[in-house]
Amino acid sequence: MWVIPAFISAALLGLYDVSKKHSLNGNAVIPVLFLNVLFCCILFVPLIILSYNTDTLQGTIFQAPPVKWSDQPYLIAKAIIVLSSWITAYFAIKHLPITLTSPIKATQPLVTLVTAMIIFGERLNGWQWCGVLLGLSSIYLLSVSGKKDGINFKSNKWVWLMILSVLTGSASGLYDKYLIQYAEIDKITTQVWYNFYQLIIMGIMLLFLWYPKRKQSTPFHWSWSIPLISIFLTAADFVYFYALSEGGMISIVSLIRRSSVIVSFTAGAILFKEKNLKTKIIDLLLILLGMVLIYFGTE
């Protein structure tokens, strides 16, 4: 059943968002993102070694089949799309409250839903439609509540960067569906190799864009929450790919993953001491109700 893995992915994604916010507070964005990608690649090295040199992972969901040369352009494109979403999101998360960035990111399923219905012909039943509409309405209300933080949505460049992250993130989700179900590229192969291409791209940015001007921008400092970004992200993505490979509808899986806003919101209240929370609690409860309706509609 692909719904349960989708909810697990959502919880891990919430922890991933919390780790990002903690790591980026007063820190340089490019090196944090580079280390995130580096640690993700390190986590995948054992899978590659065991898959290519032994039969230990044979027949398991952890096996990473060899990548074909004809698949390389698809994986490079995946890396570029994901990095575009990450870079814009990282800068926005650094400068905005997590109780605001998480709800904005949670609007991503709206774009994914409309596009998935057009491209892949996906259809929802009544329960699912109720859950989707309730979830999207709640997310919108939560975003409106965020205005009480004193941020002007129309003129704030960090808000617009977060919106751009939503658009590119939606494109990444739809592209996952294509890679797994149409291009027939293995889910683990996709997850492993696009991370290595990201490492190359981020290495170039680190050396030629950030390092020469590092003294003119926010300095970098180490935090133990930086490797946690990679751990939670890798786990969340793995479970996400598994849900899609089991026949999960991209529109539903993407919406469920946005319930990670519950974890992010809680962290914003407890860990980061963010304000204007009372008006957002009802919106969060409505989001949770929407997730429950989607679950029952998928049973």
Image (cartoon, helix red, strand yellow):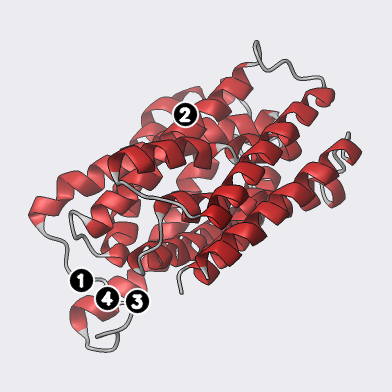
User: In the orientation shown, which residue stands out farthest toward the front?
Assistant: 126
The CA distance from mark 4 to mark 2 is 32 Å
User: In the orientation shown, which residue stands out farthest toward the left?
Assistant: 70
Answer whether labels 4 and 3 touch (C-beta < 8 Å). Answer: no
Residue tagged 3: 62
Q: Which label is found at residue 65?
A: 1
Question: In the image, residue 186 lies at what x, y percent?
Answer: 24, 65
Q: Is residue 255 left or right of residue 272?
A: left
Q: Is residue 197 left or right of residue 230?
A: left
Answer whether labels 1 and 3 touch (C-beta < 8 Å). Answer: no
Which of the 4 image quarters holds residue 169? Answer: top left
Give above or below for 19 relative to 154.
below
Closest to the camera, between mark 4 and mark 3, is 3
The residue sitting at 26% across, 50% down in the picture is: 178
The CA distance from mark 1 to mark 4 is 11 Å
Q: Is residue 172 left or right of residue 285?
A: left
The residue sitting at 57% across, 29% down in the picture is: 162
The residue sitting at 62% across, 23% down in the picture is: 159
Which tag, 4 or 3, sits closer to the chain's start? 4
Question: In the image, residue 277 lies at what x, y percent?
Answer: 87, 39
Closest to the camera, between mark 1 and mark 4, is 1
> Could you tell me if residue 289 is visible in this image?
yes
Q: Amino acid at mark 1?
A: Pro
Query: Pointer 4: residues within 10 angstroms few (<14), some, or many (20+)?
Result: few
Answer whether labels 2 and 3 touch (C-beta < 8 Å). Answer: no
Residue tagged 4: 49
Q: Secondary structure at mark 1?
A: loop
Which tag, 1 or 2, sits closer to the chain's start? 1
The residue sitting at 29% across, 40% down in the picture is: 119
Q: Secondary structure at mark 2?
A: helix
> Could you tell me if residue 83 is visible in this image?
no
Residue tagged 2: 210
